[in-house]
Image (cartoon, rainbow, N blue to C red):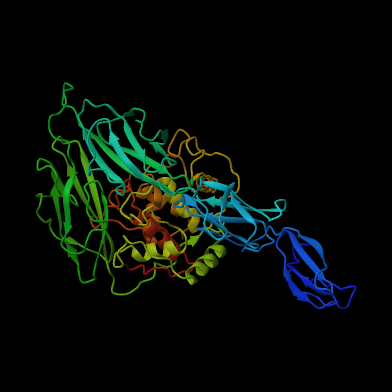
């Protein structure tokens, strides 16, 4: 019998109508069917006993009914402990895929058989139907998992193939950072990306040892790949400040973190002897009479922002020196450590305040820049006529339509480290919604950190929806294989960016205010009457025409002391604000993204 026949009846007919008959011990009327007899898989003996009228004579008929075993090798359900099957499970579908985050390092599979007599194995190990398998370790990438069902007949099988793809790690942080000479200030912490250190004049080179938090991440020191936990090659130190960049790239090839270390080498006196005087040019504290610094003060962080109400027309700054033998000036005026500066007048909008520290050796310096934004009485449009976004470089219509579509969507969760009342919060919020920026691995924005040349170019490419997929070839000697190479090559081909000599771009070097002004200015077409803005420190700058055009358009602003500080490094929040202001003032884009009076 087939496996589908689970019971049977027997109809015996006696030769003598006076005889009686029993099937499996139960009397049955001659010529009528017996009751249903349940059949097990395999042989089922059935006895038919006939008793003659004399009550003594009997005949026994033996019938063996063989029921075939089940050939059902299907599953009725298949689930994973993480991730969802694609397509949704169906018994007749045997191929599936699922994706999990990098944090999921193992997975369990729960198969349920359609026929309780079938058996099932996951990756060769028997599993109870309806119960989870043992944990299956997942590597980054594709992980094939086989679920084999064997029917009761021992021959019929079905194999369900599940490919689970584990995402690569986005961890681009360091767990340790040490120097061969000098001590980092502040003490290393994975979330702190700006440091300073001082060494004697006799130290002419230094090595940096970075250790990544995730063994799959890679790290470069000043653009050269270094093995995690091993020292970099010797880095030559000049007298004074020596910026060193440590760039970590996560396993996903996209997420990066840049740690900036400024090593200050002491000067020498006439005759070549090392100066015994201190080379400490750091602050231990920095406060304002109104507003709060963003980010919170740290000795190694040199870029800050603060916002004040329109009613605050002046402000004082109180710097405190780490080394009392150093001197400090606020906007060029000497201030006693721990005491307030003179009142600094504030214009509506951005006001750059410089706090310059000179160490005892007279050579080592460090400049802290605070951008204080004073609120306006009311919104005021940019000077007319505003510039135009250059349609020869980007598709202006596409920029506007894509931006409007993005702004119409639900706004993403804001960064936890950007105060809602900070001067840059609206620009950062807009940039996040437009897809121009993303946070660090810890989910924060770190607006006070300096931004690299590569990071800024990538932001511009995203803001203007430039096509970075076309193959343009390597344009700089140090960008091949760099995560931002497509954006760099695209802007180079458009004539927007230039190298820094010897065919290199130095993608991981912090970008200056002058460089940003030039890049953004080249993306626009200005009225020929613009470019008249004047700053006392830009007359000799190669970027003076660009800075003047950008200032006239109200995209960049100077400090309260009449200076622009073209060679100062730009912070992440300042860079974002400049890009968003550009999109706001360009009259052919016509997007009122932010209040330009702020």
Horizontal arrangement in the rendering, residue 396 relative to residue 338 (left or right):
right
Placement of 172 over or under 413, stated as above or below = above
Residue at the extreme top of the image, as rendered: 271
Residue 131 seen in render: yes
Q: Position of residue 430 (x, y in %)?
A: 42, 65
Horizontal arrangement in the rendering, residue 73 relative to residue 166 (left or right):
right
Horizontal arrangement in the rendering, residue 135 relative to residue 445 (left or right):
right
Placement of 412 over or under 490, stated as above or below = below
Q: Residue at x 28, y 74 (%)?
A: 377
Q: Residue at x 34, y 64 (%)?
A: 425
Decide which of 238, 314 is in the foreground and name it: 238
Q: Position of residue 267 (x, y in %)?
A: 20, 30
Q: Position of residue 282 (x, y in %)?
A: 19, 44
Residue at the extreme right of the image, as rendered: 15
Q: How many marks?
A: 0
The quadrant where residue 575 appears: bottom left
Placement of 166 over or under 63, stated as above or below = above
Q: Position of residue 439 (x, y in %)?
A: 39, 56
Q: Quadrant of the N terminus?
A: bottom right
Decide which of 188, 83 is in the foreground and name it: 83
Q: Quadrant of the C terminus?
A: bottom left
Residue 36 seen in render: no
Q: Residue at x 60, y 60 (%)?
A: 86
Horizontal arrangement in the rendering, residue 398 relative to residue 450 (left or right):
right
């Amino acid at each position: 019998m087939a496996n589908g026949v689970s019971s049977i009846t027997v109809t015996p007919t006696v030769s003598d109508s006076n005889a009686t008959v029993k099937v499996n011990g139960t009397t049955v009327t001659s010529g009528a069917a017996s009751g249903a007899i349940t059949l097990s898989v395999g042989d089922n003996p059935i006895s038919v006993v006939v008793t003659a009228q004399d009550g003594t004579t009997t005949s026994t008929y033996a019938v063996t009914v063989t029921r075939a075993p089940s050939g059902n090798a299907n599953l009725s359900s298949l689930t994973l402990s993480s991730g969802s099957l694609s397509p949704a499970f169906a018994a007749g579908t045997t191929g599936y895929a699922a994706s999990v985050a990098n944090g999921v390092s193992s997975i369990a599979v729960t198969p349920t058989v359609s026929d309780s007599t079938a058996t099932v194995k996951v990756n060769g190990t028997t599993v109870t139907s309806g119960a989870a398998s043992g944990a299956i370790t997942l590597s980054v990438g594709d992980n094939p998992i086989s679920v084999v069902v064997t029917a009761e007949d021992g021959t019929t099988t079905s194999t369900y193939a599940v490919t689970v793809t584990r995402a690569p790690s986005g961890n681009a942080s360091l767990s340790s950072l040490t120097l061969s000479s000098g001590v980092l200030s502040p003490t290393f912490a994975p979330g702190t990306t700006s440091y300073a250190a001082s060494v004697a004049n006799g130290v002419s080179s230094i090595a940096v040892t970075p250790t990544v938090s995730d063994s799959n991440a890679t790290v470069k020191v000043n653009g050269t790949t270094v093995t995690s936990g091993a020292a970099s090659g010797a880095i030559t130190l000049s007298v004074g400040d020596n910026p060193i960049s440590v760039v970590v790239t996560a396993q996903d090839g996209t997420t990066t973190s840049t740690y900036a270390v400024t090593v200050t080498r002491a000067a020498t006196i006439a005759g070549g002897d090392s100066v015994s005087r201190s080379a400490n040019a750091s602050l231990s504290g920095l406060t304002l009479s109104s507003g709060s610094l963003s980010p919170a003060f740290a000795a190694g962080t040199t870029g800050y922002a603060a916002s004040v109400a329109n009613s605050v027309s002046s402000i004082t700054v109180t710097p405190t020196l780490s080394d009392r033998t150093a001197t400090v000036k606020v906007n060029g005026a000497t201030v006693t450590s721990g005491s307030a500066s003179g009142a600094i007048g504030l214009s509506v909008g951005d006001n750059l305040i410089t706090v310059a520290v000179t160490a005892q050796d007279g050579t080592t310096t460090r400049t802290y820049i605070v951008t204080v934004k004073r609120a306006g009485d009311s919104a005021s449009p940019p000077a007319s006529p505003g510039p135009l976004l250059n349609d020869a470089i980007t598709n202006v219509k596409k920029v506007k339509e894509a931006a409007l579509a993005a702004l119409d969507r639900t706004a993403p969760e804001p960064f936890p480290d950007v105060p809602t009342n900070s001067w840059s919060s609206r620009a950062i919020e807009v940039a996040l919604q437009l897809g121009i920026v993303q946070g660090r691995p810890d989910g924060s924005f770190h607006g006070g950190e300096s931004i690299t040349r590569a990071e800024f170019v990538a932001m511009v490419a995203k803001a203007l929806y430039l096509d970075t997929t076309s193959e343009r070839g390597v344009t700089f000697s140090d960008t091949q294989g760099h995560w931002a190479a497509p954006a760099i090559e695209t802007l180079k081909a458009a004539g927007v960016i230039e190298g820094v000599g010897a065919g290199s771009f130095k993608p991981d070097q912090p970008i200056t205010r002058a460089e940003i002004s030039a890049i953004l200015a080249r993306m626009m077409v200005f009225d020929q009457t613009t470019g008249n803005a004047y700053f006392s420190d830009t007359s000799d700058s190669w970027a003076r025409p660009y800075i003047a055009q950008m200032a006239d358009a109200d995209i960049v602003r100077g400090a309260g002391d009449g200076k622009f500080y073209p060679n100062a490094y730009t912070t992440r929040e300042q860079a974002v604000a400049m890009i968003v202001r550009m999109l706001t003032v360009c009259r052919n884009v016509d997007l009122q993204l932010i209040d330009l009076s702020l």
